[in-house]
Each structure stands twice: as structure tokens, then as C-alpha cells.
Image: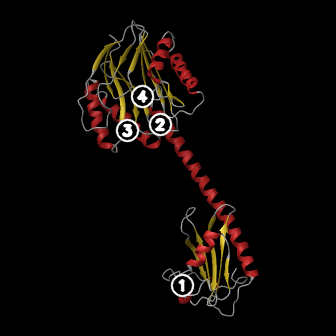
Amino acid sequence: MQKAVPASRLVLLLRPAPGAEPVPIASRRAGGRPVNDREPLALSQTIVRTVLEENTAVVTRDTLSDPRFMGQQSIIAQAIHGAMAVPLFDNKDVLGILYVDTTDPRVEYQESHLELLTLLANMAAVKITNGRLLEAEAARARMAQELATATRIQQALLPPAPSGVAGWSFHARIETCYEVGGDLYDFHMRDDGIRVVMLGDVSGKGMGAALLMSSIIASSRVLYDACDDPLSFVKRLNAVTYRSSDAGSFATLFVAYLDPATGRMVYVNAGHPDAELVGGREPRSLPATGVPVGMLPDFPWTEAEVVLEPGETMAVFSDGIPEAQRGQEFFEVARTREALGELAREPDLARVADGLIERIDAFAAGEHRADDVTLLLVRRG
């Protein structure tokens, strides 16, 4: 290039982001020698500003007599005789500047020099834009792969619902609004025959919520057999969650210890939506008995007790169900209770879950879900 465009110095400057100040990414002296890193790379700010703000080329054949640059210290100090600068324009944004100057008084830049420099700048802009697009696409592909892996890991953490429990049936359903979510559920059978069922909803969304969700499940599986009741379980889980999560991170949680032999169930509802009991003599609700876990270092949670009647179904769900939205209107708890009451006659719990989610989707009328939807069903036969 320096044979076609005689120059003492050539500099390529790029904006790291649209609107940002350009920074030099490449510079050469006559003969292709790199500019010494310790040598100050002073450029005329008048030239730089004109090219960036007006998206126009600048050429001066004699800086000392050009009124635009008279008194410019960067030009005077380096004895610059002539200079040209053209924008790196990709038909949308000015990506940067291609700049040349000369200290040789015998060199006078002509229109042919400017045309060639402009052509080179346009070619460079196309290559830079294509390179950035390829980098962005590669980054998107990496992110998609990482999210797919995170989704598989998260789904693997969630167990299948228990089957073959005499007199009982279980079902769980989770549908995330993003690739990964903060809702969770779990089943566990203790050595004493007690069945533990749990459903939780971590604050926030996305990867941060998914990481806390995974941490809560991992901690819970250590505590199930170490805690003889849900109250001690919640207190110990709270201590672990509070220590290991950021301020403002917490999880609503419903955890119950169920004795299949008697139907007796002891539970703690830590700030979670009321669980609903339907299909028995009268509908019942199991309200909160304390605040979410991880919110405070300690709290006086209480546990409550209920006996599931034969034919009765317990539904525990995340707030993505009652807070399903259509415009400014919510599905709300009343519609959830009504739907569960009508669906309780279904013999298959999977059909109960299908029916409830179908009603939510019909209510939302195609609007994108803003939250995860999780449902856990337990029925005494």
C-alpha cells in the first residue's frame, strides 16, 4: 500500500463499540516498520473528529498552510506535511478510521491517493464487519451449546415421580419460560418409609436462578435423612442457602413429610403459594407458615399437619400458574382452585396436569409466559 500511497506513517483505528472512541489497533512506519510501542501515537484530533462525526474523508496537502490544522500541536510536533483520513464505513456505522500522513515535503496527496485509500478502507470495513459477525455467531453458538448443556443437567436433577406406591399416585410437571429456570421439585423416600415431597421457586430467572436451584436440590438431598421433620429441614436448609447465596436471593418452598400408611402429612410452607387439597369432602388450602428460605439468617417457621383423605389430591404449584397473565389480568388463585376442583375427578394425574396447563394457555391467549410453571400432584387412592 505504501508504494501506491506514499506515507511516513499508517494507522488503523477501530471503535470497540458503536459511538465509542476509536483506538489504534495497527500502525506502521515507512517500509512496513511497526511503530515503537514506547513512541507516542499523536494524531490530529481535528482530523479524527471530522471523519467520525461527519463520515467524510479528510485530506490536506500542506498542513502548515491549511487553516483547518494551523496551530495543531500534534501536527507541528511531528513535522507532518500532509495527511489523509477516511472512514471505515460498512453502510451502517463508522467502524473507525484509516489514517496516513507524511513528513516528506516532496509528497503532495492527490485525489488518486484519496480514492485508493477510500477503496482500501471500504474493503477493510467489509472484512471487519464480516469478522465481527462470524465472532458474534460463534459466541451465540457457544452460548446455545452451554445453555443446552445446562438444560440437560438441570433436567437430570429432577427425578421422575414415584410409582408403585400402594394406595398413592404422584405426578410432577415443570415448564420453564427460558432454557433454564429457577423452579424445582423433588421426591425422596426416607429409611423410615416417610415420603418427602418438595416444590420450590427461586427468586430471579435465568442462569443465576438455575444455579441456586441446583444448590438447593443438592443441599436438600443431604438433609432429607438427617432431619426427622420438615421444620428442622427448613431451618438447616435456610442456613445453608443464606450463607451461600447473594443478598436478595431466596426461594419459596413447600416441603412435606408424608406417611403413606396413614395419610398423615407434616409440612412447612416457606413463603410459597398455598397448596390446595381437592377431591375430598371440602376443598382445603395449606397456607404459608413462614418466610422464604435464604431471605433471613433465621426465622421462627412453624410446621402444620394434615391428613389426606382417600380420594383427595394435593396440588402444589409455583406462582407461574396463578400469575399467568393476559394483558394486565392474572389467572389468579381463584381460577386455579376452580380448575383443580373440576379436574380432581380425572383418574389420571397426568390428565389433571394437562387440563390445568391447557386452561392457563387458553387464558393467556398465546402470550409468552413470563415465569416458569411447575406443578406437583399427590393423590391418596
Q: Which mark is residue 215?
A: 3
Residue 226 shows in this picture = no
| CB contact under 8 Å: marks 2 and 1 | no
Closer to viewer: mark 2 or mark 4: 2
Q: Is residue 311 above or below residue 330?
A: above
Measure the alpha-carbon separation of dots 2 and 1: 56 Å
Q: Position of residue 314 (x, y in %)?
A: 41, 16
Residue flagged by tag 2: what amino acid is it?
Gly
Secondary structure, mark 4, is strand
Residue flagged by tag 3: what amino acid is it?
Ser
Residue picked out by circle 1: 74
Number of residues whose C-alpha sits closer than 10 Å to that of mark 3, classed few (under 14), some (14–19) or many (20 or more): some
Closer to viewer: mark 1 or mark 4: 1
Secondary structure, mark 3, is helix
Closer to viewer: mark 3 or mark 2: 2
- Mark 2 and mark 1 lie on one chain; the one further toward the N terminus is 1
Residue flagged by tag 1: what amino acid is it?
Ser
Residue 354 shows in this picture = yes
Which residue is depicted at the point 67% across and 81% down?
59
Q: Position of residue 5 (x, y in %)?
A: 71, 82
Residue picked out by circle 4: 185
Residue flagged by tag 4: what amino acid is it?
Tyr
Secondary structure, mark 1, is helix
Look at the image and tell me in which quarter the N terminus lies: bottom right
Residue picked out by circle 2: 181
Q: Position of residue 151 (x, y in %)?
A: 51, 38
Closer to viewer: mark 3 or mark 1: 1
Measure the alpha-carbon separation of dots 4 and 3: 13 Å
Question: Could you say which is closer to the camera, residue 87 or residue 184?
Answer: 87
Look at the image and tell me in which quarter the C terminus lies: top left
